[in-house]
Image: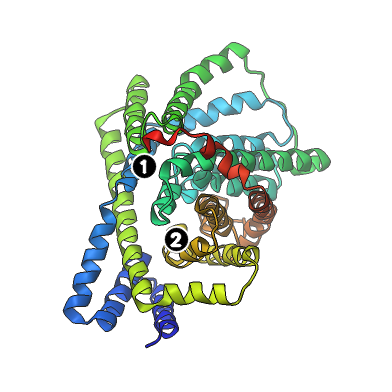
Amino acid sequence: MIWWQVLTVILIGLFFLMIFRVPIAFAFLLVNIVAAYFIWGEEEGLDLLISSMGSSLINFSLLPIPLFILMGEIMFQSGTAPRMINTVDKWFGNVPGRLSMLAVGSGALLSTLTASNMASTAMLGSTLIPEMENKKYNKTMAIGPILGSGALAAMIPPSALGILLASMGQVSVGKFLIAIILPGILMAVLYMVYIIIRAVTNPHLAPAYKQSKVPLKEKIMDTLKYITPLGLLFVLVLGFIFLGIATPTEAAAMGALGSMILSACYKQLTLDVLVKSLSGTLKITVMILLIISASAAFSQILSFSGATRGLVGIIQDINTVPLVVLILMLFTVIILGTFLESLSIMMLIVPVFFPIANALDFDLLWFSVLILLAIEVGTISPPFGTGLFAMKGVVSRDTTMMTIYSSAIPFIFLLIALILLVLFVPSIVTWLPGMMDTSFH
């Protein structure tokens, strides 16, 4: 079989397995086994497959993933997240669209604790939606900011999803974590500017209400108690990576230890919290490692079948403007995001898109950030974006999916605007990594 026939059969096989709701990692594994059997033969094919999957896990750059996940799990299980939201709430006062602004501010802080769009959306939704409904917020101004803020989870370090993408794409993990800082901040700023404009021009969407005045001393004390320690931990972890004092793995280990110390200081580090945190970390890590190994085998099969070379050759032969190719790839990722979850998309596109990006001489760091942004657009895009269904699980029963869809649309356009900004101003991504002392990386 020639390469395009192999690729077509593989993709059709994956499509049918997904229709029957086979978990994505197992779907790839099954397709890999069948493809290896036909390409290399029974014994040799399985040997090469096992070797490829095993070697993909012997990768030092993957070590930060479980450590950062553990850091977030401990902070979540110990009840730090609700205290953070309450503290942020005290600072917003009577700003227009106060609760919508709180969703964005809290979402940015929660992003340092979780790498999951769905977890962040569910947490913010269950906490803020009832209060927004009580204050007569329009559903679009209640749901939209929370959906948009869920996308911040991947764009503010430490981002396990970002680390995974960087590892799979052979991009420096340390530089990637620093590279997403400015896009993440810009994302939050775009959301807040939009909310203020909407709240000022259409006050009925987010009605103002009397807010009891919180003494300045109380706000400062709560900030020092619940926000500052987490902020210092965040700055230390990223600062050590940025300055080259520590590798991402060492910084992640420091972050996990720091989260334990903070929880102990809050008198919340119980045996139950530790067990739940370790259990959650184990489940997520095993899933990620299984996906990585299956994706590595898939990449090798594409390479041996000639599919990777064939696709790259087509792109080079048609002599298309590289920008057009890039836009088509980003559009493909967004479309995939409307019905696949983030890890599945990465498994599909990394073995195909990254060799093309490399052949077109794209900066892979910049390209990786664009891909991550496109993935996040997909997660809140109708009809099947995963963030939409996480939101459906926490809103009132009378909220229809059409309401959730319409609430997401403005934030989809804001994310696309950010993609275009990063696309045409690459220094947003490359400036901070370019300043790093790389002597320790």
The answer, for residue 175, to whether it is visible in the render is yes
Question: Furthest-bottom residue in view?
Answer: 1
Which one is nearer the viewer's eye here, 47 or 91? 47
Furthest residue to the right? 201
> At x 37% / y 72%, what residue is drawn?
303
Q: Which residue is mark 1?
A: 69
Q: Is residue 27 left or right of residue 147?
A: left
Q: Considering depth in this image, is 410 or 100 the residue closer to the camera? A: 410
Q: Amino acid at mark 2?
A: Met
**Quadrant that contains the N terminus:** bottom left
Disc number lying in front (1 or 2): 2
Quadrant containing the C terminus in the rendered view: top left
Which x, y percent locates residue 383? 59, 66
**Residue tagged by mark 2?**
346
**Residue 384 x %, y %:** 54, 64
Q: Quadrant of residue 428?
A: top right
Image marks 1 and 2: residues in contact by CB distance under 8 Å: no
The answer for how far apart the CA atoms under marks 1 and 2 are is: 19 Å
* SS assignment at label 1: helix
Q: Mark on residue 86?
A: none
Q: Earlier in the sequence, mark 1 or mark 2?
A: 1
Q: To which quarter of the image does residue 427 belong?
A: top right
